[in-house]
Image (spheres, rainbow, N blue to C red):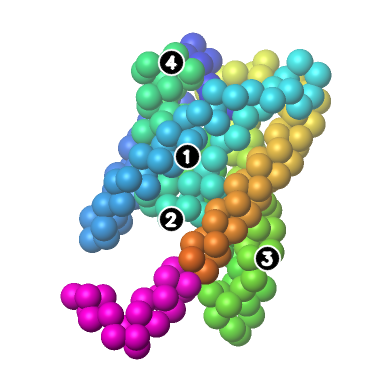
Amino acid sequence: MHIPDGVLDPVALTVTGVAAVGAVGAAGWSLRRGSPRVASALVGAGAVLVAHLVDVPVYGAHTAHLVGGALLAIALGPWLGLVVMAAVLALEALVLSDGGVLALGANVVVMGVVGVLVGWAVYRGVLRLVAGTGSVGSISDAWRVGAAALAAGASVIASSVVLVGVLAMGGAAVAVSGAALEVLIPHHLLWALLEGALTGAVVAVGLAWRRSRARALARAAVARQVHVLDGDLDTLG
């Protein structure tokens, strides 16, 4: 999905650039009152950067990789997820020449703004639908994994639609011709399935680790309580 330089005209570059700066700026403004969570952001950025470097064959000669927009939104929240995705795309364009520097705004809009926010909206929407009148916190991990997979797939579909729109707006008529769409549609549908499967797997592992850690902490708390009852006053210090 990385758009290289020389594909979009100046109007499209300007519009998407302004939109990207506005969206990332708004996301940063929304984070001003929260805790920075720098460590989590760095881990997320590193994971997405590595994922972008691993291409998987999906359709003919076409490949795909985990975009990670929905995953970042689920793990970090939509605003921090958007900022992290924009930082990753900027690093790829400036250092790895993956995506154009002038087209960075377009790539942030396609994979960052659309990918992250649509992924978050679908994920939370599914959880609220499943919870009904109950609490989202009471939803089982199985439903969370399914919601994450669906959100990730939807984020790729939404990004693909916006990508075609940006290419059309930017004058890339060849990229949105009938022949090109015959290849683009199955390619991105399979990409969406891959994104959903990988995101669901990562969320499942994360939830399993959280359950294991909670059990370990609970056992540690019980052990600490037993020591106190047995007269181990050092534990009170």
Q: Vertically, is 100 above or below 30?
A: above
Give the side of residue 75 with respect to residue 139, left or right. left
- Does label 3 or label 2 sit earlier along the sequence? 2
- Per the rendering, the mark at residue 112 is 1
Q: Position of residue 186 (x, y in %)?
A: 79, 31
Q: Nearer the viewer, residue 33 or 161?
A: 33
Mark 1, other Cα within 10 Å: few <14 / some 14–19 / many ≥20: many
Q: CA distance from mark 3 to mark 2?
A: 18 Å
Q: Which residue type carries mark 2?
A: Gly
Q: Vertically, is 54 above or below 137?
A: above
Q: Residue at coordinates 63% horizontally, 65% vertically from top-left? A: 141
Residue identifier under label 3 = 143
Q: Which residue type carries mark 1?
A: Gly
Quadrant the N terminus occupies: top right
Give the side of residue 83 with respect to residue 181, left or right. left
- Per the rendering, the mark at residue 88 is none
Residue identifier under label 4 = 96
Q: CA distance from mark 4 to mark 1?
A: 18 Å
Q: Position of residue 206 (x, y in %)?
A: 55, 53
Q: Vertically, is 224 above or below 152?
A: below
Give the side of residue 178 with respect to residue 200, left or right. right
